[in-house]
Image (tube, rainbow, N blue to C red):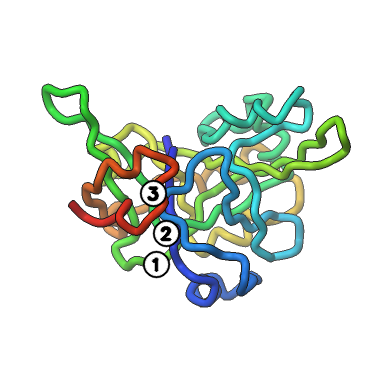
Amino acid sequence: MCERFTLAMDAIALQQSFPDFDIPDAELTPRFNIAPTQPVAVIPNDGSRALDFFVWGLIPSWARDATFGNRMINARAETLSQKPSFKAAYKRRRCLILSDGFYEWSKLPNSTRKTPYFICMASGDPFAFAGLWETWFAPDGSEIKSCVIITTRPNELVARLHNRMPAILPREAYNSWLNPEECRPTDLPDLLTPFPANDMSCYPVSTLINNPKVDTPECRTPL
């Protein structure tokens, strides 16, 4: 499961890391504690090849109200083509969700307390979660674009903390994932596998991250 993540890089650094996409200069604010229902940086498969901001928490077009998305922050890779909330988006509306790290919690032995860990690339480079997106129209005619992070089984690093991890796409998979054509359920599952553990790093951080109102660099400072 992925409940919090970061994107602290400025637009110039992010553009250098994602040269095939348009990253507007003025739209990024460093974020150290991105939480559900907040805007997240995405690149949708709408043909624009450009960064946009969608609400984290998928609201299907048939949802009665926007609060439906509050609990739709993750989608299991294994059942995307079966779940009513995800199967249409999986076929037609896929996206990259940009990040440079995410958090996971691990329970201390003989305790109910959990220690948060920050997980990132060993290189420090940003990366992209596989995501799905939707457009929902409110009764007043306004629209909300929302997204969900796809999860998969954990690699050896994350398995020490949790039994799921976000599906991180390798760079060579971006074009396939963003293909605007409708896909079949059998077309894309091979992309949604655990990212190599040897390329990643993790370390414990402060419980500051537990409060979604705290969004400072100290959230991911090593203990």
Q: What secondary structure is found at the residue carrying circle 1?
A: loop
Q: Is residue 50 visible?
A: yes
Q: Which numbered disc flags the more N-terminal residue, 1 or 3?
A: 3
Evaluate if marks 2 and 3 touch, with contact meaning CB atoms under 8 Å apart: no
Q: Nearer the viewer, residue 189 or 116?
A: 116
Residue type at mark 1: give it. Answer: Asp
Q: Is residue 186 left or right of residue 217?
A: right
Q: Amino acid at mark 2?
A: Asp
Location of mark 1 (residue): 125
Q: Residue at x 64, y 71 (%)?
A: 24
Measure the alpha-carbon separation of dots 2 and 3.
7 Å
The residue furthest front is 213
Name the element at disc 3.
Answer: strand
At label 3, the amino acid type is Phe
Which residue is tagged 3? 102
Residue 101 to residue 137: above or below: below
Q: Residue at x 56, y 27 (%)?
A: 71
| Residue 137 location (% of width, % of height) | 82, 36
